Image (cartoon, grey):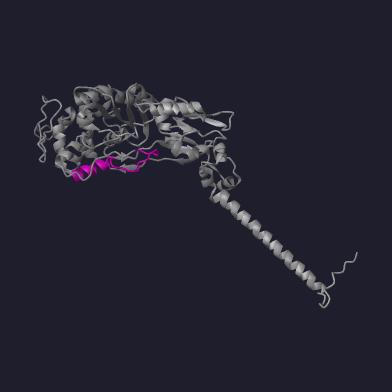
Amino acid sequence: MSSNPTPAPEGQPSPPRGAVRLSLSRTGRRAGLFCLVLILALLVNMTRLQVFQAKSLNDNTANQRSIIARYGQPRGDIYVAGRRVTGSTATGGLYDYQRTYANGPLYAPVTGFSSQTYGNTLLEGVEDDVLTGQDSRLSTNALWDQISRTKVPGGNVFTTINPQAQQAAFQGLGNKRGAVAAVDPATGRILALASTPSYDPNGLTGAGQSTVNDWTTLNADSTAPMLNRALRQTYPPGSTFKVVTLAAALQNGLYSGINVPTNSPDPWTPNDTNHAITNENPGLPCGNATLDYALEVSCNTVFAKVGADVGEADMVKTAEAFGFNQNDQTIPVGVVKSNFDTGLTSQAFLALSSIGQYDTAATPLQMAEVAAAVANNGTLMQPRLLDRITRGNGTTVQTFGDQKFSQPVSPQVASEIQQAMVDVVASGTGTNAQIPGVVVGGKTGTAQNGVGNSGTPYAWFISYAKPTPSSASPVAVAVVIEDGNANRADISGGGLAAPIAKAVMQAVLGG
């Protein structure tokens, strides 16, 4: 066979041998360049998908691969006092691992739940990236792990909860509907978050029919067991708010101290209404009473007039310094806003707001913050639920320090309020919170409920305790009970809520 090139058509000259080689070389270069462009485009697209769009693709609800991968390894754990309160168990099914809870109902208001069907709530939700190993801080080579899809073990979340305080809060609440929040005044560490009735999150973790049944039953329950009453429910704080009004009066110089008589008639009628404000017990000498005595026996007339005399601007300023009206409070779990109205043009409404009625509303955590600020000599620390986050091997990747939120009152004013709250417990409406050998300050309250106050009132107690008069307080507590029932307002808070607060304070002091 000849290797000569094909002759040119008749009448045309044959191309030189070099021209044929040049033409073939140019075609090869073009084909190679085109292949290189295709390869580069493929690499760019792979990078875009695996790096820049990985999260959106993983989060797509239609992506079963992402869901299978999420449950393809044990979830990191949540710890209380160095002990795990969560775990993971192998299922043998499509989703390899399922969440488990130790003492599920006890810690449900802290952990929330992680469900293969219904998602995540509370700490399980806000720290989901850590617990599933998706947080980039858990990897020593995050970019490569993301590209190669290497599984990073889930991290661990360590809380500030005191297990003895948590147990005391739940035992105290028993079968009542209510909540307890306890904090360390000096640091803002949350020591207890209890909400009853509670629920067992173990029933919600799977993907089968039993999970659906438990979910349906819990949501149909009229007592709302999945509602976190300590963080996500507000109540009229009633007479416990008088501590804030007392703080506003002293901080703004309306009175020089708690033993100065007030110019407050009994009953007292605001200047823009014909409806007089009265006291629950007309036999008490509340007319022109001192602030100390008025707090001790909870005179409505005194603190309603004090709030009106302080004025709307300074009452709002003081309430917000104690933490009211925050729209975005997180611990890091979100906390609903506690409300003290702004723009109150009516003296009557301001007076009612100043004794914890009208539209004033607070979470139990908020009222624990009020007690904590007083106990901490006027400084309110930012409440927090987390201590640290670690990798699966125990290496710490983040710690959470103490942060000051505000200074609602000066140390001198705080000292005056402390004495008034001590007198409430020593000889007033809060004697059920007394702890032998311990300094305890508190304030009782019962908030009216329903149209025309026809509902069962809410029983409140806020308090703090310290081992000696000169020592720092390690605990401040707020307790609310939804189904309290009593004839006299503050006796309800003292009778039902104060013993629970006492038990929680004893648990912290004894720990």
Q: Quadrant of residue 386?
A: top left
Q: Is residue 339 left or right of residue 103?
A: left
Q: Quadrant of the N terminus?
A: bottom right
Location of residue 493 with respect to 389 vertically, above or below: above
Confirm whether residue 256 shows in the render. no
Front position in the image: 329 or 469: 329
Residue 299 in the image: state x and y as whole percent.
Answer: 15, 30
Front position in the image: 138 or 474: 138
Residue at image position (37%, 40%) is 330
Residue at image position (68%, 63%) is 33
- Residue with the most extreme right position: 1
Q: Is residue 184 left or right of residue 443?
A: right
Answer whether residue 353 is magenta in the image: no
Q: Is residue 134 left or right of residue 355?
A: right
Residue at image position (12%, 30%) is 278
Q: Which residues are magenta?
A: 312-335
Residue 447 in the image: state x and y as whole percent.
Answer: 23, 30
Front position in the image: 25 or 503: 25
Residue 472 in the image: state x and y as whole percent.
Answer: 30, 33
Residue 167 in the image: state x and y as whole percent.
Answer: 38, 24
Q: Quadrant of residue 480?
A: top left
Answer whether residue 316 is magenta in the image: yes
Location of residue 173 with respect to 291 vertically, above or below: above
